[in-house]
Image (tube, grey):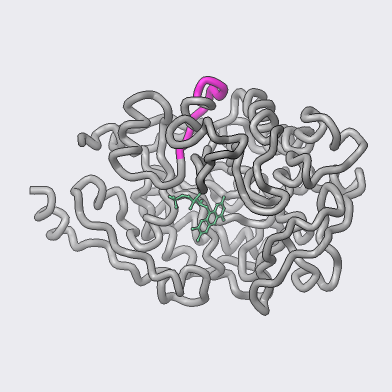
C-alpha cells in the first residue's frame, strides 16, 4: 500500500509536524536517581528517535504527591527542569519536536514510594493493580480520599508542571487522563464514590479532568495543550462499565481548541463489554467528529493501517509505542519497507543503556537498498 500519507506535514497547535508518525509515551524507568532527574541517557534515547514527526515523553510526575512509579522522572524541581532541558535540546538539535506527558498516579502509587504516606485518590477504593516500587511490583493499597483543598492543589500542580515543561524546552504538554491514573480514577464511577462536586454525576466526575485542562491551557496556551483520553477496558474496577463511554464522550466533546487528542484503540478484546461497538477502527470513527484538534490514533498501528486512517480522515497522526522501542529510525524503516527489529522485553523496564539506547538505526546504505 502507498504510505505517502504518513510522510506529509501537518499542523498541530502551533507546531508543524514534518510527518504523521509520533512516538507514543513510553515509561522506561531510566531515571534511577534520588531526584527523579532525567540525565544524558534520556537525551541520547530521545534524540535517536527525533525523526518522528512528534515525540511524547514518558509519563512524568507533576509533583511529589503525584509521583508513584519507581525510577520515573518528575517535573517539579529545578534539577528536573534542567535535566529535561538537556533532553529537549538534544531532540531539537536532531530536528525533532517533543511534548511532556503530565502524570499523577493517584492510587497506583504506594506508601513505599511516599515515605510511608498513603497514596491519594477520589475515594478509598483499592484499584487492584500492581504498584511499581524500588523492591519490585507489589499489590496496590487502599488510598486516602483527597480533600477539596488537595484537589485544588493538584489542579494548580498540573499548571506548574506545564509551565515547568515549557521552561524545560518542551514544545507543549499532554495530560495523561486515561488508563488507571488520577484523572481516570475520578472519571470512573467504580473508583469515585464522592458525594461532593467531584463525584456522583458524569458532569461532577469529569470536573477534575476539565479543571486540569483549563488550568494547563491557561498556563501554557491551548495550542500547546493536549490530552491522552478515551474509554478503556482494563482490569479490576477499571473494567469498562455502562458509563465508561458516556463519560469519555462528555469530556472529549468539551475539549475544543486544544492542540491534540491521543486516542487509543482497543488494547484488549472488547467482545461482550460495553465498548464492543468501538473495536478496530470504530474507536476513531466514533470520536473523530467530536474533537476539532489534531487526532492522534494509537495502538497496534502498522504503516498500512496508519496511512489508511489518515487517508480516510479518521486520524491526522498515528502514534507508535512498542515499534519505536527497538526501531529508533522507525519512520525510515516504514518509508523504505525495511524489516522491524524485535523488542528485548527483559530490558524494557530495566536500568542502564542495554535495551535502551543500543538498538541501532539501519545503515543508510541498507535503507537505500531496500528502497530500490
Ligand atoms: C513499555 C511501555 C511503557 C508505556 N508507558 C506509557 C506512559 O508512560 N504513558 C502512557 O500514556 N502510555 C504508556 N504506554 C502505552 C503506550 O503509549 C501506547 O499507548 C501503547 O503501547 C499502545 O501503542 P503500541 O501498540 O504502538 O505499542 C506504555 C506502553 C509500553 C509498552
Where is residue 279? Give x, y as percent: 48, 36
Give the residue drawn at x 67%, y 24%.
Answer: 254
Q: Is residue 360 above or below residue 105?
A: below
Find the magenta span and give its range: 288-297
Q: Is residue 168 above or below residue 312?
A: below
Res 18 visible: no
Give the residue drawn at x 56%, y 42%.
Answer: 172
Where is residue 331? Give x, y as percent: 30, 48
The image quarter in which residue 19 lies: top left
Give the residue drawn at x 74%, y 39%.
Answer: 187
Q: Residue furthest top?
A: 289
Q: Residue furthest bottom?
A: 135
Q: Residue furthest front?
A: 272
The reply, left or right, for residue 341 in relation to residue 196 is: left
The image quarter in which residue 204 lies: top right
**Residue toward you, 136 or 294:** 136
The reply, left or right, for residue 192 in relation to residue 56 is: right
Where is residue 314? Give x, y as percent: 42, 27
Give the residue drawn at x 51%, y 31%.
Answer: 13
Where is residue 40? Give x, y as percent: 49, 69
Res 337 visible: yes
For the N terminus, the image quarter is: top left
Q: Is residue 53 above or below residue 27?
A: above
Is residue 367 located in the magenta-colored stretch of the structure? no
Q: How many marks?
A: 0
Amino acid at each position: 500500500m502507498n504510505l505517502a500519507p504518513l510522510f506529509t506535514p501537518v499542523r498541530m497547535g502551533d507546531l508543524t509536524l514534518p510527518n504523521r508518525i509520533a512516538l507514543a509515551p513510553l515509561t522506561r524507568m531510566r531515571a534511577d536517581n534520588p531526584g527523579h532527574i532525567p540525565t544524558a541517557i534520556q537525551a541520547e534515547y530521545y534524540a535517536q528517535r527525533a525523526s518522528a514527526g512528534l515525540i511524547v515523553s514518558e509519563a512524568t510526575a507533576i509533583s511529589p504527591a503525584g509521583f508513584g512509579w519507581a525510577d520515573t522522572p518528575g517535573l517539579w524541581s529545578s534539577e528536573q527542569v534542567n535535566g529535561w532541558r538537556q533532553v529537549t535540546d538534544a531532540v531539537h538539535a536532531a530536528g525533532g519536536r517533543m511534548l511532556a506527558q503530565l502524570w499523577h498516579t493517584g492510587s497506583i502509587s504506594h506508601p513505599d514510594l511516599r515515605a510511608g504516606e498513603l497514596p491519594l485518590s477520589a475515594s478509598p477504593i483499592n484499584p487492584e493493580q500492581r504498584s511499581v516500587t524500588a523492591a519490585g511490583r507489589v499489590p496496590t493499597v487502599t488510598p486516602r480520599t483527597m480533600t477539596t483543598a488537595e484537589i485544588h492543589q493538584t489542579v494548580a500542580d498540573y499548571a506548574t508542571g506545564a509551565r515547568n515543561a515549557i521552561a524545560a524546552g518542551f514544545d507543549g504538554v499532554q495530560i495523561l487522563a486515561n488508563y488507571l491514573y488520577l484523572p481516570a480514577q475520578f472519571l470512573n464511577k467504580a473508583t469515585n464514590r464522592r458525594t461532593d462536586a467531584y463525584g456522583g454525576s458524569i458532569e461532577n466526575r469529569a470536573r477534575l479532568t476539565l479543571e486540569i485542562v483549563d488550568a494547563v491551557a491557561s498556563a501554557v496556551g491551548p495550542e500547546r495543550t493536549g490530552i491522552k483520553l478515551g474509554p478503556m477496558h482494563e482490569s479490576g474496577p477499571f473494567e469498562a462499565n455502562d458509563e465508561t463511554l458516556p463519560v469519555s464522550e462528555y469530556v472529549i466533546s468539551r475539549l475544543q481548541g486544544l492542540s491534540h487528542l491521543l486516542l487509543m484503540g482497543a488494547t484488549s478484546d472488547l467482545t461482550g463489554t460495553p465498548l464492543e461497538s468501538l473495536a478496530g477502527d470504530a474507536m476513531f470513527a466514533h470520536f473523530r467528529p467530536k474533537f476539532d484538534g489534531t487526532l492522534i490514533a494509537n495502538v497496534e498501528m502498522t504503516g498500512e493501517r496508519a496511512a489508511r486512517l489518515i487517508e480516510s480522515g479518521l486520524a491526522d497522526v498515528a502514534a507508535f509505542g512498542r515499534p519505536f522501542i527497538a526501531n529508533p529510525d522507525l519512520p525510515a524503516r516504514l518509508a523504505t519497507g525495511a524489516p522491524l527489529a524485535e523488542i528485548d522485553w527483559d530490558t524494557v523496564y530495566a536500568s542502564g543503556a542495554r535495551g535502551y539506547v543500543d538498538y541501532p538505526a539501519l545503515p543508510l546504505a541498507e535503507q537505500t537498498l531496500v528502497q530500490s
